[in-house]
Image (tube, rainbow, N blue to C red):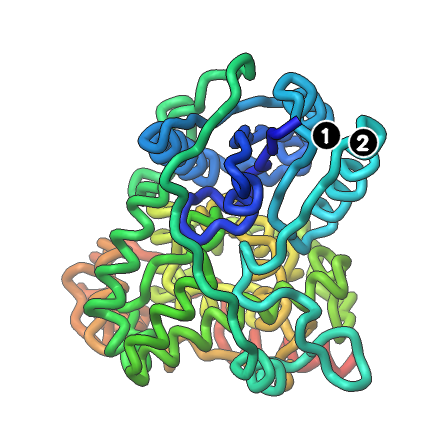
Amino acid sequence: MNVSVVLFTSDLRLHDHPPLRAAGDGGRQVVPLFVRDRAVDLAGFAAANRLAFLSDCLRDLDAGLRERGGRLVMRSGDVVDQVCRVAAEADADEVHMAAEVSAFARRREERLRPALEAEGRRLHVHDTVTTAVAPGAVTPASADHFAVFTPYFRQWSAQHLRDTLAAPRAVRVPDGVGSERLPARGDVQGVSEGLASGGEREGRDRLTAWLGGGVAAYEDRHDDLAGDATSRLSPHLHFGTLSPVELVHRARLAGTPGAEAFVRQLAWRDFHRQVLAARPGAATADYRTKHDRWRSARSAREDIEAWKEGRTGYPVIDAGMRQLRHEGWMHNRARLLTACFLAKTLYVDWRIGARHFLDLLVDGDLANNQLNWQWVAGTGTDTRPNRVLNPITQAKRHDPDGVYVRRWVPELEGVEAPSVHEPWKLQGLDRATLDYPDPIIDLPDGLARFRQARERG
């Protein structure tokens, strides 16, 4: 046997792909395989926006493989059954895949390894495919992971990253391995109207444009809601059409304060992964500070629906939630504000908000999404768990002219700043003609409820 299988998961690229490089070493034939795992659908992670973006990624990956003489093999069903079946069809003696940190990914590996070994095949799992620094590569002296970002970042920054790998010039796929039809974006219902396109080519083009332009001002402008001055690379990192290792290397070459600030955000991504790797239960359970006095979903139902629909009466909150629904993506500052409003002003369990984000976000990454929600809710790694972000103050600071708000809340199109951030204060006819709700709660009342609940807890 001189054949390898590469199981693609959240690493849908050809550039800087260690499993693909190792699989083809010595001129071996390679079966590039993607399995649409039914368990993912059953777990509720097959959201429409991610399925549509995934379809783009798979078709682009297949096109790149065909340019190199290969093709992508597509299967659906139980991932272990399908990998073993394809390995048998190709007479492969080894399978390569990227390491992942979620409990789901661990169970997949734990099932796959003995199933392959029972057939005389080996499983090779590669680190630093979906992260720049592997979870567990840096740890504090007295624990298995870092619970605070700053000391983690110091050690993370000192790590020597592996060199990046070029895309293979040729991929030789053995005959006789069948494939299902690749999915298409048009197959998916309920996709956000403004959802971006996926695929490695798209990601690499966006990265090149970002490093050649916007990244230089990133340190100063990353919170500029109206300027939309972030990279928008998070979907490509989530699906692995871009390599985190390559991003760090190329950003550091830029040598600007903005590039260093961008690298810091990549480190936050790795930080959350090393937390989840050490504490997989943090995907659903409070990581550090347990709270059990959240308002019940039933009693808060109307508030939750108003938040989801972008009808809270707080323009910057509503703008963020409407951007999420339209694009399947939201500006990071808006994510912080909308999450804080739900968890600390409405005092609704962070898991309800995290679930809604996962239902819509194209970059709906379990580690980043859940642990960022916990950071905001005060149950996670934030060293100031009682911090509350005032949406009005934040809106005036990060959207001073109201451009972001008017972009997503057209009911306020004719209202000038700073009134656009507090339209309930308008007088007479100006207020009467607005088709926009009053705030569903006064901020002082929400803050008082939050503080009282924490004191009782």
Q: Image quadrant of residue 385?
A: bottom right
Q: Which residue is drawn at 63% across and 52% down?
A: 126
Q: Where is residue 269 in the image (x, y as percent from the top left)?
A: 53, 66
Q: Position of residue 289 (x, y in %)?
A: 75, 75
Between residues 53 and 288, which one lies in front from this camera angle? 53
Dot 1 corresponds to which residue? 80
- Residue 347 shown left or right of residue 74 in the figure: right
Label placed on residue 115: 2
Q: Position of residue 324 (x, y in %)?
A: 40, 51
Q: Image quadrant of residue 233?
A: bottom left
Between residues 242 and 354, which one lies in front from this camera angle? 242
Q: Residue at x 46, y 61 (%)?
A: 244
Q: In which quarter of the image is the C terminus?
A: bottom right
Disc 1 residue type? Val
Marks 1,2: beta carbons within 8 A: yes
Q: Is residue 77 visible?
A: no
- Between marks 1 and 2, how big is the CA–CA gap? 7 Å
Q: Residue at x 81, y 31 (%)?
A: 115
Q: Where is residue 128 in the image (x, y as percent from the top left)?
A: 57, 60
Q: Image quadrant of residue 265?
A: bottom left
Q: Can residue 53 be seen in this view?
A: yes
